[in-house]
Image (cartoon, rainbow, N blue to C red):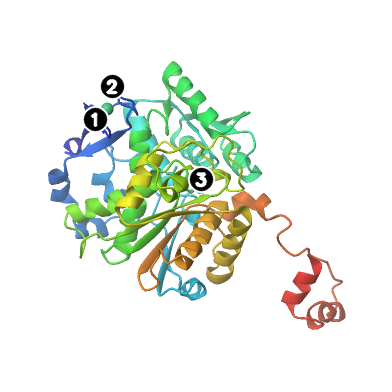
Amino acid sequence: MADELVQGMKCRLCGKLYPKEPLNFCTDDFGPLEVVYNYEAVAKTLTRSAIQSRPNTIWRYRELMPIDGEPTVGIHVGGTPLVKADRLAKALGIKELYIKNDAVNHPTLSFKDRVVAVALSKAVEFGFTTVGCASTGNLAGSVAANASAAGLESYVLIPDNLEQGKVLGAQIYGAKVVAVTGNYDQVNRLCSQIAFRYGWGFVNVNLRPFYAEGSKSMGFEIAEALGWRTPDHVVVPMAGGSLIGKIYKAFKEFELLGLLNGPVQTKMFGAQATGCNPITNTVKTEANKVRPVRNPNTIAKSLAIGDPADGFFASKLMRETGGWAEDVDDDSIIDGMKLLAETEGIFTETAGGVTLAVTKKLIEQGKINRDGSTVICITGNGLKTQEALLGHMPKLTAISPTLVDFEALVGAAPAAELADATV
Ligand SMILES: *Cc1c(COP(=O)(O)O)cnc(C)c1O
Ligand SMILES: [Zn+2]
């Protein structure tokens, strides 16, 4: 039954059709391949009530996920909270704001578990027993964890400058973690060579069309949680530029299937760090081509892809939906992390700081309308990028366990002043 839902793949440039196979580019023009569904068949079983009767994971939308059988990897992924963020909305001076909080996604605390669950379920269908990835950090941990749980061997290749939390957070699962001297683009090129030479399933190389579809689940969850409607604005952090496009694709698929209460009128906004801004730069300069950034330099390492695979399509999407893009420097990223933590109690990684700081900037620029509804996508957890905060928090001075000392410390001056005085 499920077999006919996923028809095959199609080149996004020339439209050439391909069967379901571990291949990510068109052999005629190197255009990216995208999964094609039979939406008439999907509509027969994917109704609101069917969705609501299923467990709260990405698989409740399984007809729109590119696997043929039942999922075998990442069964519990997804279903993260959409938090109504009133205190943050007030701080930003807007009316209706929500945080899609993938900082608490299961099992590795980033949105990457969504794409990995789908890619590895597909890898199992294809018969791969060894899988891998090129990673800026979060994908490393997610592939390692989900591969272990599925009994697959994994190779994880990373640039050699990643945060300790990301490196340990991949090694602990017994994955073969390989650090490479060079930036992400160089790591990615090496992974392409390895995947095709050894016949392994690399989630973001030869399995990329299937992997990328997993990101749609974030869009489905947002629309469902808002009562089957889509927000006026969505702000999305961009690395390779895939997630932003897939959230929008999810909205359009729900619309096509008649699952929404109104038409999709969402404007898509993209966020990057100024130290690696190939996509936001394309949008802001209204260029037709993405100019790669040769030497990314930012604390938002998870977003540091200088030559983004989906940068062109992401830029086009932001333009066509009436959205926009911005980038922010490292100090603003830290401020963004603090603001989210202090207003909503959510500790995000540097990428989340980027998203929040960019949102603030876009509101100040008038690109995001203060009266509309806005969803901010928080995609990773702050516990993994603690280095970024070193030196940005007040130093602790221990007191003796006496009231006298406590009052000397706290009572003598308000906590905030004290904190300032000790930096
Ligand atoms: C990978 C990643 C992204 C963006 O993913 P793309 O689909 O490559 O644009 C955003 N945030 C975090 C934390 C990530 O790890
Ligand atoms: Zn093509």
Query: Which residue is nearer to you in this view: 92 or 44?
Result: 92
**Where in the figure is residue 123, as x and y percent of width and height?**
37, 31
Q: Is residue 385 left or right of residue 68?
A: right
Which quarter shows the N terminus?
A: top left
Q: Which residue is mark 3?
A: 277
Query: Which residue is nearer to you in this view: 199 or 174?
Result: 199
**Where in the figure is residue 15, as x and y percent of width and height?**
22, 31
Which quarter shows the C terminus?
A: bottom right
Distance in Å between CA atoms under marks 1 and 3: 28 Å
Tally of numbered discs? 3
Q: Residue at x 76, y 70 (%)?
A: 420
Q: Is mark 2 within 8 Å of ligand 2?
A: yes
- Tell me the SS state at disc 2: loop
Q: Which residue is mark 2?
A: 28
**Where in the figure is residue 400, as x and y percent of width and height?**
87, 71
Mark number displayed over residue 14:
1
Q: Amino acid at mark 2?
A: Asp
Q: Residue at x 49, y 41 (%)?
A: 142
